Every structure is written in C-alpha cells, then in structure tokens.
Image (spheres, rainbow, N blue to C red):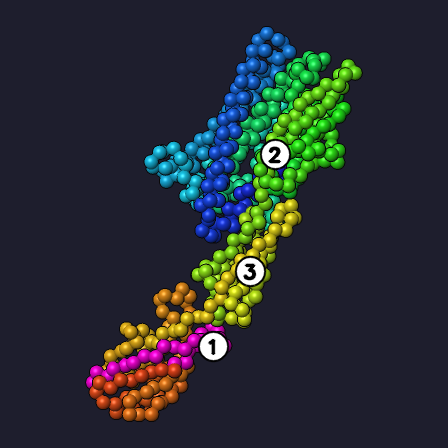
C-alpha cells in the first residue's frame, strides 16, 4: 500500500469486504451478515488462543533469561513486543466495544449473542471517523495508533529479521490506497467509510489477529536466535508457516511460507517432502527464499486444507527430519450476481422497468450486464424496456471481473406481462363500481381520462385521445380528444331525467411511449340526476 499502491495482501483482505458496498443498495441478506459475524467470532476465538500461547511463551522466555544470559536480550525485546501488542490490542478492543455499545446489537433474552443481522448500516463509523470529507479526531487517533505500533515494532526488530519487518510494514501500512477507479483514498475512507458495521467489526478483529500472529512469530524467532549455534535442529527448531491472509478463494494461489524459526541460508533443507491434503507438492510448486520454502500450490475446493510431511536437513553429515503439520482455509469465489426489479418480480411491456444490479465482490465499473432493451442509468442502476421482446420471459446476463482478472458470471430470469387495463376517470376521479351520478351541466363540462389506479406500482401518466358516447334513444356519438363535442353535449341536454350515459371505447396512450398499444380502458356509466 505504500506510495498509494495496493499490495496483494491488502487486495485479498479487502475483497471480503468490498461485497458489502454493492449490497448496501439492496435489502442485504441476513445470511450474509450472519456469515461475517461468524467469521468475526472465529477470529475472536483464534485471538484468544494466540494470546494464551503468547503469554505462555513469554513466561518461559523470561524464566530462561533469569538463569541463561543467552536469553536476556531476547527476553527484553520480547517484553517490549508484548507491551506494544497489548497496547494496540486494547485500543482496538475499545473501538469494537464502542461500535457494539448500541443496545440493538445485543440479544434481549440472553444479553450475550451479538445480533449481526441488524449491523448493515455504516452511519456510526462514518460519523465517528470521517465527517464533512475529512478525518475526525477519532479517525486520526485510529491512524496514529496503527502508526505507533508499526514504527515501534519495525524499529525494535530491524536487526532481528528483515522479512518480518517488511511483513509488519505491509500489514500495518496506513498510507493512502489506490482503488480500482485509480483514485487514491486515505486509509479510513478506503477501509471503513460506507461499510456495514459488521464488516468494520470483523476488520478490526482481523487487525488484532495480525498483531497476535506477529507477536507469536517474533517469540519463536527470538527463542530460536537465542539458542546456541550448534544446537540440534530436531530439539530446538520448529516449522512455522506464515500466510498473508487466513482464507483464500478456491482455485486461487496459496502463497504461504513454511520455514524454521532461524531464518538464514544455512537452514535450507536438503530435501522437501510435503503433501497438500495427502497429495505430493511438486518442485515446481515451491521455491527457496533465504532458507524458507515459498509455496505456490492451488487448493481446488473450499474448506480446510492440511500441509503435512517433513523437511530434511543435513547436520554433521546426518539427515535430520523436521515434521510439518499446518492448516489453511479456502473460501468460494463469488459466483452469484444480485439482480432485482425495484418495483415487482415481473417486468411490464410499455414502461422502463428499473433494476438494481450488483455482483458480490466486484466493483460496479467491472460489471457487464446484457439484456434486450437494457439501459444503464447510474451506479448499479439500470432500466429495461421489454416491449419488443416477443417471448414471455427475458434473461439478464451479468459478468464481473475479479481483482485477479478472472471472469465470473451469473444470470436472472424475469417474466414479462402486459400493462393491466386502465380505469376510466371523469374529472380526474375513478367511479365507484364504474358508475357516476352527476348533473347534466357538470357532465357536459367534464373531461374523460384514464388511470392505472393505486394498485399499479408505476407512475404511468396516460392521455385519452378519443371515446364514444351512448344515450338510449340516440345514435352512438364518436368524440375526438378527452372532452365532449357539440353533438354529445346536445344529446346530453335532450336526455330525460334519470337517463344513463355510457362512455366506452375509450382510447388511451402512455404519454412517454405513445407507440405502445394499451389494453382496452374500462367503460363507465353516468346517471343524470336532473
């Protein structure tokens, strides 16, 4: 991320959260919110496990330092790392507690279970960290805490392990980030503004996980570096696997690194005998990097995967085996687009039907949508006119380009219906059960119209271009336009008291689409009351 560039690690971490931006315009699935809540809870469990292991490792190191000078320097560094980690972890915990302080996020009956399904809004952190296009004091404090941790850790470990220092600089880089649109945004705007609270909560827990993982790696390195140079590998070294992220999409490259605690060229193994889920990892699927084994294997299925086997090192002319037993998790790539009609679950001929379209995990500019009569109106917003579609259904095809260049596709099928028959109006009113009672003078001055009624979800203005008038004892009179002509007015004047005037064959058109042939308008009856 330094210099405004987005690192591969940051891209993959943010990929889990980008899905929520596109989904904010929709009624977000409760299952999706719950899924991210489940990830947060699993990360919390992993963090608790790391904290326990790190405390035990630190205590052992301090005990060794009390009786062995080789461990004194290592113990001082470890104590400083532990203090920095605790301080930063406690700050992140305070932010999470603040985020969850709203009582609607806690189950009333147990007061224990977090209600992730209602954490679909972003207003809380938007206002807390970013207001009026600028960082708030709280937002700046968030960045400052990250900077203090990063700078202190890199300064403390600069002489211990350059790869680990580079990893810390990468994981906790708070500089601007260039998004898919080429615009550089500040860290807070890019990672938290506009995101649902559940994703922000999970992201903070992920940062805590990175802090705990780094502390764990540092403790192992310090212990191993404090050992005597001639110490036996089988007794004093442990295989470590470091991965930039905790989960991967199925089919994507797993770029984890397996190494010993002491990292230098002298620790390069003579043989590598590793298995991925029981299948041999070939020489083309890994390479050596300062004694480390950098993996480039693919896991084709989603779920937990195991890397097992052994690394064989030469010591005093003899082969020494170090066993490997590590796990990682892959998750499915997004392959479901969200296509919804904003009005109904069908599309109507003669009107521009609004659609909202997004693709989980894909930016709007990388989404391609095709369908007959489709028109893009804005970000995620489309209109579709199916008047010219002859069949009774239409398919909307959606494809998206993921950050790694892979194309994912989906489609949605909609039924097509005709616009329902309009109701006739008189002076803008719809008759009760199709009948009016009017003075003949009022009728003569009235205008005849047509309306789709309140039950039709579209605002569809109609224009009447003609109608017919029938009065018992008089021939049918054809009228052009929406007002009675002279012949009709005279016939109404001569009609007897209580006579019924029938208005039928009403011709109506859609003002915005006059070429569309509307269904027949319902006829009306008017009883003269004078």
Residue for point 38% across, 88% down: 478
Find the distance from the CA under tag 1 to the CA under tag 2. 61 Å
Q: Is residue 209 above or below residue 359?
A: above
- First in residue order: circle 3 vs circle 2: 2
Horizontally, is 100 left or right of 169 in the view? left
Q: Is residue 409 above or below residue 389?
A: above
Q: Nearer the viewer, mark 3 or mark 2?
A: 2
Q: Is residue 20 above or below residue 175?
A: below
List x then y, in percent, for residue 193. Answer: 49, 44
List x then y, in percent, for residue 69. Answer: 63, 9
Task: Classify mark 3: helix, strand or loop.
Answer: strand
Quarter holding the N terminus?
Answer: top right
Residue that label 2 marks:
305
Find the distance from the CA under tag 3 to the CA under tag 2. 37 Å
Give the residues drawn in magenta, as a range.
506-530
Residue that label 3 marks:
396
Q: Which mark is residue 517?
A: 1
Q: Nearer the viewer, mark 1 or mark 2?
A: 2
Find the distance from the CA under tag 1 to the CA under tag 3. 25 Å
């Amino acid at each position: 991320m330094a210099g405004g560039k987005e690192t591969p690690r940051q891209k993959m971490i943010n990929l889990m959260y980008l899905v929520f931006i596109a989904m904010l315009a929709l009624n977000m699935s409760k299952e999706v919110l719950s899924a991210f809540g489940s990830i947060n809870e699993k990360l919390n469990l992993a963090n608790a496990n790391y904290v326990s292991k790190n405390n035990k490792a630190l205590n052992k190191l301090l005990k060794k330092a009390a009786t062995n000078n080789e461990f004194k320097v290592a113990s001082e560094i470890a104590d400083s790392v532990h203090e920095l980690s605790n301080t930063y972890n406690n700050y992140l915990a305070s932010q999470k507690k603040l985020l969850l302080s709203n009582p609607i996020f806690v189950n009333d009956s147990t007061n224990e279970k977090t209600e992730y399904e209602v954490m679909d809004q972003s207003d809380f952190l938007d206002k807390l960290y970013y207001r009026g296009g600028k960082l708030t004091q709280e937002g700046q404090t968030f960045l400052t805490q990250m900077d203090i941790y990063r700078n202190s850790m890199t300064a403390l470990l600069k002489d211990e392990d350059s790869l680990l220092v580079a990893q810390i600089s990468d994981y906790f880089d708070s500089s601007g980030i260039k998004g898919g649109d080429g615009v550089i945004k500040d860290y807070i705007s890019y990672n938290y503004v506009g995101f649902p609270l559940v994703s922000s909560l999970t992201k903070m827990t992920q940062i805590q996980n990175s802090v705990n993982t780094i502390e764990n790696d540092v403790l192992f390195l310090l212990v191993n570096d404090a050992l005597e140079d001639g110490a036996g590998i089988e007794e004093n070294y442990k295989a470590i696997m470091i991965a930039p992220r905790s989960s991967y999409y199925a089919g994507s490259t797993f770029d984890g690194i397996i190494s010993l605690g002491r990292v230098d060229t002298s620790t390069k193994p003579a043989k590598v005998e590793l298995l991925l889920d029981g299948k041999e990892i070939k020489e083309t699927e890994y390479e050596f990097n300062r004694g480390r084994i950098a993996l480039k294997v693919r896991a084709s299925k989603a779920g937990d995967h195991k890397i097992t086997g052994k690394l064989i090192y030469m010591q005093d002319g003899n082969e020494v085996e170090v066993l490997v037993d590590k796990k990682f998790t892959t998750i499915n790539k997004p392959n479901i687009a969200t296509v919804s009609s904003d009005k109904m679950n069908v599309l109507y001929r003669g009107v521009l039907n609004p659609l909202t379209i997004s693709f989980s995990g894909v930016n709007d500019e990388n989404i391609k949508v095709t369908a007959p009569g489709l028109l893009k109106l804005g970000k995620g917003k489309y209109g579709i006119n199916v008047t010219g579609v002859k069949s009774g259904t239409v398919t909307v095809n959606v494809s998206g380009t993921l950050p790694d260049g892979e194309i994912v596709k989906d489609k949605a099928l909609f039924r097509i219906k005709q616009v329902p028959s309009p109701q006739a109006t008189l002076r803008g009113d719809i008759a009760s059960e199709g009948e009016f009672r009017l003075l003949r003078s009022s009728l003569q001055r009235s205008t005849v119209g047509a309306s789709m009624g309140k039950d039709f979800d579209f605002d569809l203005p109609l224009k009447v271009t003609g109608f017919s008038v029938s009065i018992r004892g008089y021939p049918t009179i054809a009228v052009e336009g929406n007002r009675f002509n002279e012949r009709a007015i005279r016939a109404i004047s001569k009609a007897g008291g209580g006579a019924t005037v029938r208005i039928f064959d009403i011709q109506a058109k859609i003002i915005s689409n006059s070429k569309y042939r509307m269904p027949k308008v319902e006829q009306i009856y008017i009883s003269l009351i004078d």
